[in-house]
């Protein structure tokens, strides 16, 4: 029997009812989440350079490995570079190359020449190894769950409750959809504002249904729509800017008239991106009928609450990513419609 005082590889264990859950220390939680964001953003940049985004899935690293290996088929050298990268433990040389990735993928004179392909596949293998070394998506979700524990700063839906209580306080029977839910005990589920909270995620959790939102059947009637949709730290994990736009469009389909969407992103998505900032995000959402009601930036996160208030306008200017910032240390987060 597992002792309540025993430790896992990621930290102490916490007794939850009759089960034992892995708990990661606060400083490790923040470090793990930042590391995952860094690695996945770098992988996205490399895969876009290699035209290799089709089919990749952050929830299935074995599938991703198969897709990458398939792209090297017929080229033993590329396969070797990829496997070499996967064999390397954390080292400063590879980390330095990741930091210089922007200049590598934007080198028009050498774009996709043999030297670049060797570097890209080696880095891709290194990233896959680092994600695996962290424990994959499971560890990221444990880190996120532990970040929501009482005494660890609470969950992101605390601000959702603050903003929506004046809006929904007198509305009986409100229903919410939480995309990427990690717990049935967070504030959105416990605040009493909603008659029902439908919780879905790519992975199974207690009280959370396993479902890909993009595969959820479209509403057939008003009863299938929601007064509020919560999308906390989900959009940033969608694999590319087009799919993020498709997800935003799809959320509209599930909203009741005058319904609300609560979105949380890493602060870097709006403060340190080449293709996105708060102003552009507001204009983009306005084009699909969403009006900003509240926003807040903390040191790590960006929170915003939108309401569906008007018919979508023409989507001019949002079909392609437009570079609005440039320089070292910026990421490639963006959304296109």
Image (spheres, rainbow, N blue to C red):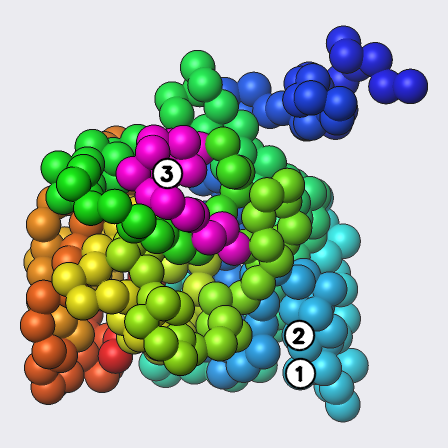
| Residue 318 colored in magenta in the image | no
Residue 123 in sight from this viewpoint: no
Residue 130 versus residue 43 in the image, above or below = above
Residue neighbourhood size for the residue with mark 2, other residues' Cα within 10 Å, grouped as few (<14), some (14–19), many (≥20): some
| Residue 197 colored in magenta in the image | yes
Residue identified by numbered label 1: 71
- Kind of element beneath mark 1: helix
Q: Residue furthest front?
A: 172
Residue 68: assigned label = 2
Q: Residue at x 20, y 32 (%)?
A: 162
Residue 319: assigned label = none
Q: What x and y, as percent, mark residue 80?
A: 76, 71
Q: Which of the two discs, 3 and 1, sits closer to the camera?
A: 3
Residue 188: assigned label = 3
Seen from the viewer's position, the closer of residues 252 and 137 is 252
Magenta residues span: 186-200
Q: What x and y, as percent, mark residue 192?
A: 34, 34
Query: In the displayed structure, does residue 25 sit left or right of residue 84?
Result: left
Can you tell which quarter of the image residue 5 is in? top right
Can you tell which quarter of the image residue 71 is in? bottom right
Labelled pair 1, 2 in contact (Cβ < 8 Å): yes
């Amino acid at each position: 029997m597992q002792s309540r005082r025993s430790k896992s590889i990621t930290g102490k264990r916490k007794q939850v009812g009759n089960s034992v859950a892995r708990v990661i220390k606060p400083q490790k939680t923040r470090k793990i989440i930042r590391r995952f964001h860094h690695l996945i953003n770098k992988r996205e940049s490399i895969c876009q350079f290699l035209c290799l985004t089709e089919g990749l899935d952050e929830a299935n690293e074995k599938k991703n490995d198969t897709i990458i290996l398939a792209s090297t088929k017929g080229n033993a050298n590329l396969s070797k570079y990829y496997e070499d990268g996967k064999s390397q433990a954390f080292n400063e040389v590879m980390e330095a190359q990741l930091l210089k990735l922007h200049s590598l993928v934007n080198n028009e004179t050498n774009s996709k020449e043999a030297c670049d392909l060797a570097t890209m596949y080696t880095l891709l293998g290194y990233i896959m190894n680092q994600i695996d070394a962290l424990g994959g998506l499971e560890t990221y979700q444990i880190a996120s769950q532990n970040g929501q524990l009482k005494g660890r700063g609470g969950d992101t839906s605390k601000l959702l409750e603050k903003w929506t209580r004046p809006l929904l306080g007198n509305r009986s029977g409100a229903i919410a959809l939480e995309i990427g839910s990690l717990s049935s005990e967070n504030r959105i589920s416990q605040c009493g504002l909603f008659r029902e909270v439908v919780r879905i995620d790519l992975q199974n959790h207690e009280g959370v249904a396993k479902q890909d939102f993009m595969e959820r059947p479209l509403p057939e009637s008003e009863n299938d729509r929601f007064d509020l949709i919560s999308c906390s730290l989900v959009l940033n994990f969608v694999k590319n800017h087009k799919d993020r736009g498709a997800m935003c469009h799809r959320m509209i389909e599930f909203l009741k008239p005058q319904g609300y969407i609560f979105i949380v992103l890493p602060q870097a998505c709006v403060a340190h991106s080449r293709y996105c900032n708060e102003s552009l995000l507001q204009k983009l959402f306005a084009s699909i009928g969403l009006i900003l009601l509240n926003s807040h930036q903390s040191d790590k996160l960006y929170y915003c609450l939108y309401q569906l208030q008007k018919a979508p306008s023409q989507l001019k200017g949002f079909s392609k990513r437009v570079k609005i910032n440039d320089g070292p240390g910026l990421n490639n987060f963006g959304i296109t419609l």
